[in-house]
Amino acid sequence: MILTKRFFPYFATLCLGALNDNFYKNVLLLLVTYSQLNALPIDVNLFVNLAAGVFILPFFLFSAHAGIVADNMNKAVLIKRLKLLELIIMSTAAIAIVSQSYMVMLVLLFLTGSQSAYFGPVKYSLLPQALSEAELVKGNALVEMGTFLSILIGTLSAGLVVSNENGLTWAAIIVCVLAVCGYLASRAIPSLPAQGKLNSNKFSLFSGTWRCINKARETTSIWMAILAISWFWFVGATYLTQFPNFAKLHLHADATVVSLLLALFSVGIAVGSFVCERFSFGHVELGLLPFGVLGLSIFSFDMIGAIPLQVVEPGFVYSFESFVANAQHYRVMIDLFLVGLSGGLFIVPLYAFIQTRAEKQECAQAIAANNIINALFMVGSAVLSIVLLGVFSWSIPELFTLIGVLNLVVLIYVYSQVPEFTQRFISYLLSHVMYRVKVQGRQYIPAQGAGIIVSNHVSYVDALIIMGASTRPIRFVMDKSISEIPLLKYVFKHAGVIPICSPKKCEATYLNAFEQIHNALANDELVCIFPEGRLTSDGDIGEFRPGIETILQRDPVPVIPLALNGLWGSYFSHKGGHALTTMPTRFWSRVKVNIAPVVAGDTTNRIALQQQVTQQFEHSIVEIQ
């Protein structure tokens, strides 16, 4: 995928842009910090903080408009225009660098931030249009890897270039060359026209930003994903900002060690993105999120405990070589790498989740809302650090410890607000820890619109297995007695399970179930029913009851036949006694989920559906054997 025309030119454009932005920004900061300070009309510390604010300000001002623009024009054309603008900005910046016109460079930094603000929404909203859903997680993983490695290379190379005897000349040449290469790469991006109905892209500074945020808040799951991503940037900004003083005060190390810490953190994120892609198994996998969040806290806590307690002589400072040679520092380095890895594991599925759940014609606007909140959280990170470290005289390890604790609070909050995240996590554990689940035919599950999944019923965890096979949320119609199992009751309740029972036992619940099914289908939701009406007692597929025909008579929506195989004999099935009453006899069983092509709801019946599920069941038996 990476070398295909639909991805590689975009990927190269992205990496070159991130590299150039960070190279130029750090060249400016280094020149101000170490060269001709008397030439500055303002204090150097004020200038440095002003530069950071000037670069991030455009994300507040222009992201909302950028999202509307990206959703309403050909994305390839927009990228070409933005890269042409970058070429103009960097050509002017080259002159400013050579002449050391610091205030002009500051203005150009604002323009660079503005160009990045307009590139941000199209950068992520392009992916679901250019890639298939099966490629989406891999695409996001590569984007995160490329972005953070480009940031790392740009930051480190700026120091190397500026320290060179002809550093100013080389810096000017490099920003121009990178801009030219980025523009040429953008010209190879294939056409990606706007999707859906076009809307007005009238610019509105404050009201537009507020509308963009409110639009994202309309969908709770997307809004929670945005907050979770923004929290990662809060954590990341805190770490990156404090690396210099952390290395100086607590590791007694010089600037070369700061570069090492930055490299470990950035490479960790890149590796975490790759790990996420490998363990997502070709689809958007929210079940990985808790591993990333918990890793951020666990390794943060351990890194604080790993800080060497040795007393060093006054004036002693570790260089890169002496720091790496000291075994006492290995644990700190490993923990920092794993913090970055956890971050990569955390954000990749969230970006893919936003891309798949946002309306196609509004995807860039959802990304724009994300960028606005990201910027807000990064400013909040700076404010918190200033208050705690400056006003309250906290130490940096205490700040990192607080971040680890707050990280767990964020985890609890997000998962309490979006039950689907919890369900996906439990489903992931079942599918990849307790069982080895293989899904065939996932592409037959419609990406949008109402539909009914019909499946055989083998165990109490069928719903969780099926949930993991679909990238869409599913409303399950489930026997009331199963939906009230103590260990699973909370999960089923928040999954929007529709309880049902025999009309002879509870007519009100029975009739209410069909009403809820109708309302869910009218709302374009995906509903799963088990037409057998009970768990199998012998492992075979029982007779489908008339309930499915009753549903289709009222709502003739598409039907997706699905067969489960491999769960019979598990702890959650009735083999050898009632489920959950016998001791587990096996783990890592192979489970097969076979999904058949969609059937028209107005031309099928329960007998035909039973035959199709049985056929898929028999196919899965052969495949497992």
Image (cartoon, grey):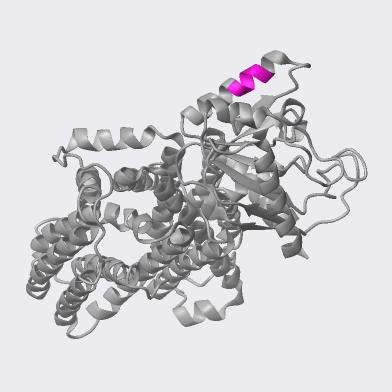
Q: Which secondary structure dominates the residues rendered in magenta?
A: helix
**Residue segment shown in magenta:** 510-514
Across and down, in percent, residue 225 comes to 45, 44
**Circle count:** 0
Q: Where is the N terminus found, in terms of image quarters? A: bottom left
Taking depth in this image into account, of 249 and 177 the one nearest to the observer is 177
Across and down, in percent, residue 171 comes to 19, 77
Instruction: Answer with left or right where residue 12 lies relative to residue 106.
Output: right
Taking depth in this image into account, of 109 and 305 the one nearest to the observer is 109
Q: Is residue 585 magenta?
A: no
**Residue lying furthest bottom:** 165
Q: In this view, does 341 lie above or below 544?
A: below
Q: Which residue is drawn at the image coordinates 58% and 53% (left, top)?
A: 288
Taking depth in this image into account, of 36 and 573 the one nearest to the observer is 573
Across and down, in percent, residue 22 comes to 27, 66
Instruction: Answer with left or right where residue 451 lies relative to residue 109.
Output: right
Q: Which image quadrant for residue 490? A: top right
Q: Which image quadrant for residue 186? A: bottom left
**Residue 162 visible in image:** yes
Q: In this view, does 240 lie above or below 53?
A: below
Taking depth in this image into account, of 519 and 619 the one nearest to the observer is 619
Q: Is residue 511 magenta?
A: yes
Q: In this view, does 264 lie above or below 393?
A: below
